[in-house]
Amino acid sequence: MSTGEQDLEIYLEFAIKLAQQCGQMILDASKARYSTDSMVYGKSGNPADLVTETDRLVEELIKSSLKERFPEHGFIGEEHTAAGHKHEFKDEPTWIVDPIDGTTNFVHGFPFVAVSIGLTVKKEPVVGVVFNPFLNQLFTARKGHGAFLNLTTRLPLSYPNPPLRLPSNISQCLVLTEYGSDRSSVTIGKKVNSVHSLLSKPGNVTWSEKKAGFVRGIRSMGSAALNICCVAQGSIDLYYEVGCWEWDVTAALVILNEAGGYTTSSQGPDEGPVNIFGRKYLAIRSGSPCDGDENTRQSQLRLIREMWGVIEEIDCPRS
Ligand code: LIP
């Protein structure tokens, strides 16, 4: 059975209501954490990869609601996968869900926490809902119909004016990245080296040299989904992360795409469209071309190449 425009609209509306319901659950659980001992576990014993009872309850609610309403759809969820459930990624509509993206933030009361509900059809992300109940920010999109903040504000935030011009090189960029939960010395060493290269002024350049290379700043907020939504807003130029998963990014990638942004997975000359299962993501905001001889995509790809040239390659197996 083929999925039409109207179906996508129905799926998006359902996902929005579900995300709002989950948002309330997350807020209630967050308040309860001040009065009760909240249960926090490190996944597979990793104390830097947290899961709480709320992650599990919220995912259970999402999974059962989707199953009841759309019994023929596939489902890939962070906590079900962590519990050992295997899934086969098929052409049929498939929901890809993170009940709490930013679990560490949730545990500490740092308000960058989101429920992330994405949908793929024929393996392509087509519907995305990312809701941060703490800041009451609801990001939504469906393929071909634009991306929105709180249902009415079109993204990027510059809309209806043309999106801001893209920077001519990464030295004019504000960048987001994360350190992730793989704390092996090799991985963290490479990530820190990349941050060092992005921030430090090479000894042989002067402050006034345009191509100095170092970026304006690096931020880290602890939620891949919200990071990508910041790029979709146009408030961040580039976000990269190596090591997060499809449930962290699928919904947000629809939002970014619909806001005119672009994402790649490959670290190399072939920067073809993102592989959501690839665990490597480099996302760039929309913008008018920075140079008259380029179109937007060419300017985006040039900045992407410049970034990948600085970021150290990290092996990121799925096991
Ligand atoms: C988290 C991501 C974060 C990343 C962590 C983790 P979780 O998701 O959004 O950006 O650095 O490794 O994957 O575990 O809070 O759903």
Image (cartoon, rainbow, N blue to C red):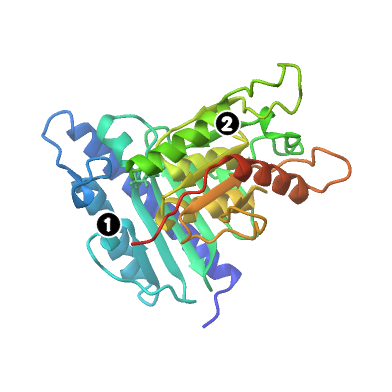
State the mark number for residue 79: 1
Seen in the picture, residue 202 relative to 106 is either above or below; the reply is above
View quadrant of ligand 1: top left
| Residue at figure coordinates x 76%, y 21% from the top left | 209
Q: Of helix, strand and loop, which one carries label 1?
A: helix
Classify residue 212 by image quadrant: top right
Identify residue for label 2.
198
Residue 244 lies, in percent from the top left, at: 41, 50
Classify mark 2: residues with Cα within 10 Å, few (<14), some (14-19) or many (20+).
many
Residue 118 lies, in percent from the top left, at: 46, 58
Q: Nearer the viewer, residue 17 or 122?
A: 122
181 left or right, relative to 6: left
8 left or right, relative to 145: left
Q: Kindly report the distance in space between the C-alpha atoms of the residues bearing marks 1 and 2.
A: 34 Å
Say if disc 2 is inside 8 Å of ligand 1.
Answer: no
Seen in the picture, residue 120 relative to 32 is either above or below; the reply is below
Q: Earlier in the sequence, mark 1 or mark 2?
A: 1
100 left or right, relative to 276: left
Residue 293 lies, in percent from the top left, at: 88, 45
Q: Of helix, strand and loop, which one carries label 2?
A: helix
Amino acid at circle 2:
Leu
Count up the numbered dots: 2
